[in-house]
Amino acid sequence: MKTDLTKEVEQALVLATKADGVGVYGALEVTLGEGYGSERVDYMTMDCKNVFRCYEIKTSRDDFYSRAKLSFVGDFNYLVLTKDIYEQVQQDIDIRFHGAGIYVYNGYDLILKRRAKQKTVHLGKKVDLMYCMIRSLSRYTVKEALKND
């Protein structure tokens, strides 16, 4: 179950990535892998140039230090932290998340603290990521359609 804070961060992330506009497509909780998948990206975007950005949201210190797998599979990958968590773990970010960009949620919107370094994602992997996004978006479509019954 998502906390209210996580939902706030997700809303801010959708707005910050401009997924509510033209040319950027976003999906929450994208399941990666075949079948039911083996891991999940908290949020993923794809733009009209087929550039993928992946975002991992951390709203607690325990979550930051957990051994849960981080799904940094995009061309650009970001860690999204609350301001409090960022201040607590700032010294460990470079050690654990080399190359990842950093966004900090200040209670209203997201502040970019560090740009992500671009990775090379080959065409075959991008096709897989598109498939995973479509599959995950379908889950939300079905949920939304059945909610109104």
Image (tube, rainbow, N blue to C red):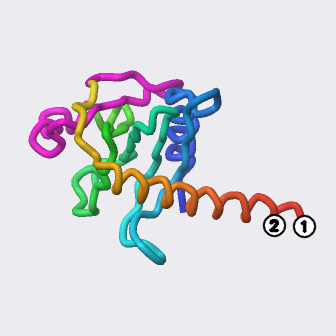
SS for dot 2: helix
Please identify the residue farthest to the front as the structure is shown.
123
Q: Which mark is residue 72?
A: none
Say whether residue 57 is left or right of residue 66: right
Using the rendered view, name the quadrant where residue 125 is placed: bottom left
The image shows residue 61 at horizontal and vertical percentages of 28, 48
The residue type indicated by label 2 comes to: Leu
Please identify the residue farthest to the bottom as the structure is shown.
35
Do tag 1 and tag 2 residues touch (Cβ < 8 Å)? yes
Label 1 and label 2: CA atoms lie apart by: 5 Å
The residue type indicated by label 1 comes to: Asp
Magenta range is 87-114
> Circle 2 sits on which residue?
146
> Circle 1 sits on which residue?
149
The image shows residue 84 at horizontal and vertical percentages of 34, 34
Q: Is residue 104 magenta?
A: yes
How packed is label 1: few (under 14 Cα within 10 Å), some, or many (20 or more)? few
Q: Quadrant of the C terminus?
A: bottom right
Q: Residue at x 22, y 54 (%)?
A: 65
The image shows residue 73 at horizontal and vertical percentages of 31, 51
Please identify the residue farthest to the right as the structure is shown.
149
Q: Residue at x 40, y 22 (%)?
A: 111
Q: Residue at x 50, y 46 (%)?
A: 6
